[in-house]
Image (spheres, helix red, strand yellow):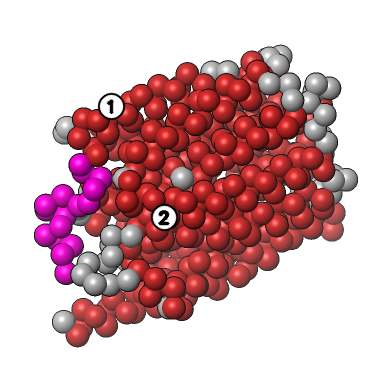
Amino acid sequence: MAVDWLSWLLFLCVLINQTGRVMIPSVMTKVMKDPEMSIDADTRGAMLAGVSMVCLAGKFLGAAITDKLGGWMILIAVFSAFAASSGYLIISKDAEVFGAMWLVNSLAYTVTWGAACQVISVSYTDEKDRAAQLAKSASASRFGATMGSLLFGQLLNMGYHWRSALMPIVPVQALLALVCFFKWAGGAKAADKGPTKAAAKADAKPTSGKSPWGNLLKLDFWLMFVSKVLIFTYTQFFMNFMAPLLSSAYGFSDGTATQSAGVAQFASAIGLVVVGKLYKSFSPKGQIAFIALELLVSLVATLTLALKEVMPFDVAPLAVPLLSLWGLAYAIPFYLPPGEFAFAIGSETASTALFTNLFDAGGFMFCTFWNKWASRSTKQGDFSEVLLSQAAFAAVALVCMPLCMYRQTSAAEQAKKAA
């Protein structure tokens, strides 16, 4: 079997992108203790709010330009910005510069997923191939978060200064910028202008004279949008608040807390790679039931962690297993149903990246406020309110996402009967 180098390049791009995303949160506890930086909990909260705003702007920017410029052009810009901001952030001793480079880092991160989806949409014409590549790239995101948390946590445990711990990522980011440039220069530019001839022939029927914005008037869009936006806060919790939770509420050291957070991130990757195969083997109705089960597991895990003081058993030994179970459970609902929904409605108007970025833009808009509130709520080391919010979001998504999937499945069945 021939190696699909395009698939693995996209996997590596998403992997390193996510590693770059978690690099700053992974060392933040050390940064806040660094007397040269003068960053306290309030400053971190303001930075997180700024990061969410930049990510929101990045998603709207990605929605506007990715389908026009093509995914490879975006990826070249992404890794160039990553390498430059990471290098400057490491050598600077100014807290304001640190915050500014975090914003550049976040802007680069936030347009990557839409770019990867755009490349997938124009490079793979078969629906099953597209779904498989979507799942593979999504797993790269979780593996990248895991790798970053474990790597940076291990370097901190080995006694490295946080600046030294971040240095290995810079040359990798710069190398990927070059690889993506050569890929684009070697012919990807032409491919990104639109579907191949085979894809155009297969998809010709839906693309004439149809506006993608009409989907925003449909109930199904909003059911999936609300679900994605609420579950989006899980990524913020895992990245920004899980290590502080383990450190302040359960007595973990900074390095061990970061590594344990990486274990929970790894569970998300397993959820996509292993459990994802099981999910894809189900019938459409079976997939709906499975998504409902995973959201129910997320609800139970977050409630148990939030109410640990009133539980009839000691939650402390179960903290990392519960967080890992939560990570395992939310991965598929976060990535696959929204991604497949974006492919389904976006393929009609060659606007897959538009809907992918709109979902994420909604998530970042909501997280702009949620991150700031969560930082204030956890200032004294109490994470119960934040965890209760995560449980409430799981409950809402438990209703909305399966309902959207059921309506989509029913509509597809009726269309087949009518045909």
Percent from the top left, x then y, of residue 109? 51, 40
Answer whether residue 205 is magenta in the image: yes
Q: Mark 1 Cα within 10 Å, few/some/many (few <14, many 20+)? A: some
Which residue is painted at 57% across and 28% down in the image? 85
Left or right of 347? Residue 226 is right
Return the residue at label 2: 64
Left or right of 18? Residue 346 is left
Name of the residue lying farthest toward the right:
380
Q: Which residues are magenta?
A: 190-206
Percent from the top left, x then y, of residue 340? 36, 60
Quarter of the image that includes the N terminus: top left
Choose between 350 and 97: the one closer to the eye.
97
Which residue is painted at 19% across and 85% down in the image? 418
Question: What SS does tag 1 mark?
Answer: helix
Percent from the top left, x then y, of residue 286? 38, 67
Percent from the top left, x then y, of residue 84? 53, 25
- The CA distance from mark 2 to mark 1 is 24 Å
Which residue is painted at 69% across and 35% down in the image? 99
Return the residue at label 1: 182
